[in-house]
């Protein structure tokens, strides 16, 4: 196969130079351009025939046309165009000359358009091609003294998104790559120095601009490695279905785009003003700090960016300190959902968030959300104050033994009684939450400690308090595990959340593809190998009954997988289990090989050993048979529901709702599933093709998480469509969090399967006790869509299957939090089938 042909602009320095060399190192063809062709001499091609360096100024139409002709004459095609050329600019808009305005716009915006227009006819005629335009977080948000650059990048965003709509039918792909934050290239440094040099002391902007310029100069010394941008371009170029947008950079900068979309304008402007003036960086200010500030600054230094809360007298100082540290505060309507949101934030980002609530009743309210995170092994930092020491044991308000309350549902619990040791204890909490098997932790302190102050010079800030490495598996046992797989006729990999927390999604996919062994993806591992991958068998353990060997990677063999026992697991099968916690090995069934180690490290050890492994025994038909069980389960479930026999005047079946939803959603959409019957069908029929693509509560089997999970999912991934598929009973447990989505401008779409009650429970009563013994399960046909409108969102009521997709499209187009209230059949019945506890008919 002929190598792909790239045309990249601006290859002399920065992102372009790094990307160009990486393309050549891959053995692909490159048309490298720059306004000075001599500046391309650094590029080295293993095969010189694959490199064509050409002079091209993106502001000159004739040079662009000559380059496109030369590229087609040399290689016959252009597969990938990367519009990378750009210039920086810093300084107040008022003091920029019009020549500067025209130049920045000509290079950064009009140049992108000109090169694209020159290449596009060729790509459209071929019915193939990928245009990747390098934008910036400045294309979505605005910062002071970057007005010209920001205006040009906003133009690139609008141009590229419109282009995406127009050329998609012709097979041409478009991706906007958004480097977020500062990268160690020459462009930001030159823009900073220009601003510092050109803004004169008599300028009305001088004090602010010089302060910001000096801060950015210091930040540049610790800027992000630009190789991550080049690698991201390669990654999206390799995707069969690349995203419209891809953000690259540290979380505190990629998250700013989401903040802009979700914060009220006035709040966001004030946030940016503080940030750029230095007020949001207290580490540069000296003075006295409160106990609340000590806790929050330690968390911010550890990477915590979000706080979920209801504010009260016991956490005033903690929440106030979040404002100074630039931590986003999301206030909820019930403390349970603060914990649920922090839980989901960690599931989607891999990073813990702060949950701070009022003492006693507030903490009790949060308890069920903390328990869910504990069951799912999700890191979370929970804090609140105790009652004051002065009132201890004599009836102070809201005083309970909080540590004793939290002990069963947290990894670690402590009370700190020393003001100066608050950073130390906060660091302990972070260490316990994020190392080993992760989980929620709890730290409390006497109320007086949060308002007390200490001189900053007296504080010792924690450093280097978390291990950087992850444990390897015993090499001999790793070889034994590979031997179990090699000698099996029907091996199966069962991958769980431990693979996600290890950051080993790509390693899992490489191992699956290198061995050809089918994989079940459980819990947070869903989407690491996409559900539409030919070797992915989805979530349900339908192929396990036929497998004769298992590699269990970072997942508990709990009730959701039949404890790894017969009949869900075949008798006599060999099992190799990998877990970071020794006591998890062999807990529910005999294990042939038990490896204590990090799932990612063990996967990499196995990958390193694969070249030595010969004579695999796997049945060549096994992967297709294993995946076939997933497809067969879906067909059998639908058949048992007798969808073809349903009268047209009968409310739709839940399966019909889920099928319609699956058909109309973007491949990379995030789907949160929450409910009884609708939850089971959602997990079964909705595909997870990206990490977090289908998210559910897990083994805790807790209802009412859907709104909180969806809000956190959208906060974590503002660029992705987010849908919460919920039962009407589940929705009722958290309904007022829809108000939270409205207030914080988080545009999620909630699809409610409204079967007028607790359908799964109602059907269980019917089967066990008879029709006349159904009690306490009827809720009625409630118009939740009208509630959405009353709270300031968008709402629609749907009764027919064909109405679902248009209603969901309108909901997304509204740009508001939305509810699509779908009436489903209250008389759905159940029957056992396909390894599921039940399905409805």
Image (tube, rainbow, N blue to C red):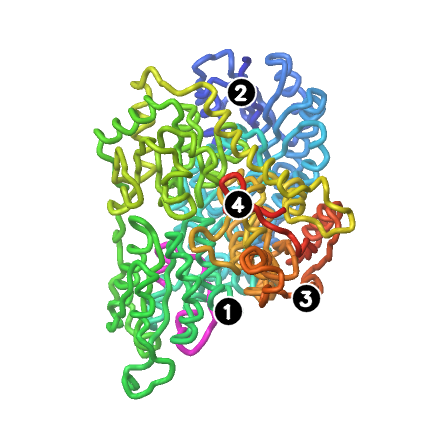
Give how far across and how far down residue 283 sits, in percent: 36, 62
**Residue 238 vertical position relative to residue 226 in the rendered view, above or below:** above
Q: Crowding near pointer 2: few (<14 within 10 Å), some, many (20+)?
A: many
* Disc sitting over residue 296 in the figure: none
Left or right: 836, with 184 as reference point: right
Instruction: Report the mark closest to the observer, 2 or 4.
Output: 4
Element at label 1: loop
Label pair 2/4, CB-CB below 8 angstroms: no
Residue named by callout 1: 334
Give how far across and how far down residue 702 sits, in percent: 47, 58
Label pair 3/4, CB-CB below 8 angstroms: no
**Residue 426 vertical position relative to residue 537 in the rendered view, above or below:** below
Gap between marks 3 and 4 measured at Cα: 26 Å
What is the quadrant of residue 413 in the picture?
bottom left
Whether residue 265 is visible: no
Q: Decide whether residue 301 is among the magenta residues.
A: yes
Gap between marks 1 and 2 measured at Cα: 56 Å
Bounds of the magenta segment: 297-319
Q: Nearer the viewer, residue 159 or 92?
A: 159
Residue that appears at 42% across and 75% down: 361
Give how far across and how far down residue 96 sits, in percent: 61, 50
Residue named by callout 2: 30
**Residue 158 vertical position relative to residue 379 in the rendered view, above or below:** above
Element at label 4: strand
Of callouts 2 and 4, which one flags the residue occurring earlier in the amino acid sequence? 2
Element at label 3: helix
Of callouts 2 and 3, which one flags the residue occurring earlier in the amino acid sequence? 2
Left or right: 269, with 356 as reference point: right
Left or right: 824, with 593 as reference point: right
Residue that appears at 31% across and 33% down: 575
Give how far across and how far down residue 135 sits, in percent: 57, 40
Left or right: 240, with 302 as reference point: right
């Amino acid at each position: 196969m002929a190598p792909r042909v790239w045309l990249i602009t601006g290859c002399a320095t920065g992102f372009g130079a790094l990307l160009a060399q990486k393309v050549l190192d891959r053995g692909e063809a490159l048309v490298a351009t720059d306004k000075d062709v001599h500046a391309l001499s650094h590029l080295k091609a293993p095969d010189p025939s694959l490199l064509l360096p050409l002079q091209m100024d993106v502001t000159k139409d004739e040079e662009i046309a000559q380059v496109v002709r030369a590229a087609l004459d040399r290689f016959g095609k252009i597969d990938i165009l990367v519009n990378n050329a750009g210039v920086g600019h810093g300084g107040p808009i008022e003091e920029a000359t019009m020549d500067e305005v025209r130049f920045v716009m000509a290079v950064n915006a009009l140049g992108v358009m000109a090169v694209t227009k020159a290449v596009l006819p060729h790509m459209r005629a071929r019915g193939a091609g990928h245009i990747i335009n390098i934008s910036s977080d400045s294309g979505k948000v605005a910062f002071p003294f970057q007005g010209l650059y920001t205006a040009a990048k906003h133009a690139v965003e609008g141009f590229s998104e419109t282009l995406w709509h127009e050329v998609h039918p012709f097979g041409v792909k478009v991706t906007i790559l958004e480097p977020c934050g500062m990268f160690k290239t020459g462009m930001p440094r030159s823009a900073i120095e220009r601003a510092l040099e050109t803004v004169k002391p008599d300028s009305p902007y001088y004090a602010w601009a010089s302060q910001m310029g000096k801060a950015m100069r210091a930040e540049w010394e610790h800027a992000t490695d630009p190789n991550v941008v080049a690698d991201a371009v390669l990654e999206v170029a390799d995707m069969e279905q690349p995203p419209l947008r891809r953000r690259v950079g540290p979380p505190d900068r990629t998250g700013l785009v989401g903040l802009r979309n979700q914060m009220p304008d006035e709040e966001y402007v004030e946030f940016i003003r503080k940030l750029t003036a230095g007020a949001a960086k207290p580490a540069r200010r000296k003075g006295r700090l409160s106990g609340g500030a000590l806790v929050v600054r330690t968390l911010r230094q550890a990477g915590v960016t979000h706080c979920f809360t209801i504010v009260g007298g016991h956490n005033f100082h903690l929440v106030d300190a979040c404002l100074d540290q630039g931590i986003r505060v999301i206030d909820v309507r019930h403390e349970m959902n603060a914990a649920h949101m922090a839980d989901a934030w960690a599931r989607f980002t891999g990073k813990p968030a702060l949950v701070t609530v009022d003492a006693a009743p507030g903490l009790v309210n949060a308890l069920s959300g903390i328990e869910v995170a504990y069951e799912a092994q999700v890191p979370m930092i929970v804090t609140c104050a105790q009652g004051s020491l002065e009132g201890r044991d004599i009836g102070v308000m809201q005083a309970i033994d909080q540590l004793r309350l939290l002990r069963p549902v947290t990894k670690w619990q402590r009370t700190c009684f020393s003001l100066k040791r608050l950073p130390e204890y906060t660091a302990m909490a972070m260490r316990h939450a994020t190392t080993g098997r992760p989980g929620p932790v709890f730290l409390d302190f006497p109320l007086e400690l949060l308002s007390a102050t200490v001189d900053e010079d007296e504080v010792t800030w924690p450093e280097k308090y978390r291990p950087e490495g992850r444990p390897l598996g015993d090499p001999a046992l790793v070889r034994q595990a590979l031997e179990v797989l090699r000698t099996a006729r029907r091996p199966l990999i069962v991958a769980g959340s431990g693979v996600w927390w290890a950051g080993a999604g790509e390693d899992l996919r490489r191992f699956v593809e290198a061995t050809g062994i089918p994989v079940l993806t459980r819990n947070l591992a869903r989407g690491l190998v996409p559900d539409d991958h030919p070797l992915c068998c989805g979530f349900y353990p339908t192929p396990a009954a036929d497998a004769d060997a298992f590699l269990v990677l970072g997942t508990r063999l709990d009730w959701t997988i039949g404890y790894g026992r017969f009949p869900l697991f075949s008798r006599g099968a060999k099992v190799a289990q990998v877990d970071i916690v020794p006591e998890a090995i062999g807990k529910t069934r005999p294990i042939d090989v038990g490896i204590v180690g990090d799932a990612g490290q063990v996967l990499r050890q196995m990958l390193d050993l694969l070249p030595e492994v010969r004579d695999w025994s796997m049945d060549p038909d096994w992967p297709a048979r294993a995946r076939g069980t997933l497809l067969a389960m879906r067909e059998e479930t639908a058949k048992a529901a007798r969808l073809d026999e349903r009268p047209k005047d009968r409310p739709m079946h839940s399966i019909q709702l889920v099928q319609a939803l699956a058909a109309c959603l973007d491949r990379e959409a995030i789907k949160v599933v929450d409910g009884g019957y609708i939850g089971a069908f959602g997990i079964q029929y909705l595909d997870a093709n990206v990490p977090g693509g289908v998210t559910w509560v897990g083994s805790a089997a807790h209802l009412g998480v859907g709104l909180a999970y969806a809000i956190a999912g959208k906060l974590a991934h503002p660029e992705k469509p987010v849908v919460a598929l919920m039962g009407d009973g589940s929705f009722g447990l958290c309904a007022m969090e829809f108000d939270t989505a409205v207030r914080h401008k988080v545009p999620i779409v909630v699809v409610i399967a409204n079967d007028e009650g607790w359908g799964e429970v109602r059907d269980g009563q019917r089967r066990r006790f008879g029709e006349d013994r159904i009690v306490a399960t009827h809720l009625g046909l409630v118009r939740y869509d009208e509630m959405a409108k009353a709270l300031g969102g968008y709402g629609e009521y749907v009764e027919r299957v064909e109405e679902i997709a248009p209603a969901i499209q309108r909901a997304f187009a509204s740009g508001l939090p939305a509810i699509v209230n779908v009436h489903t059949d209250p008389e759905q019945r159940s029957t056992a089938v396909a390894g599921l506890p039940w399905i409805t008919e």
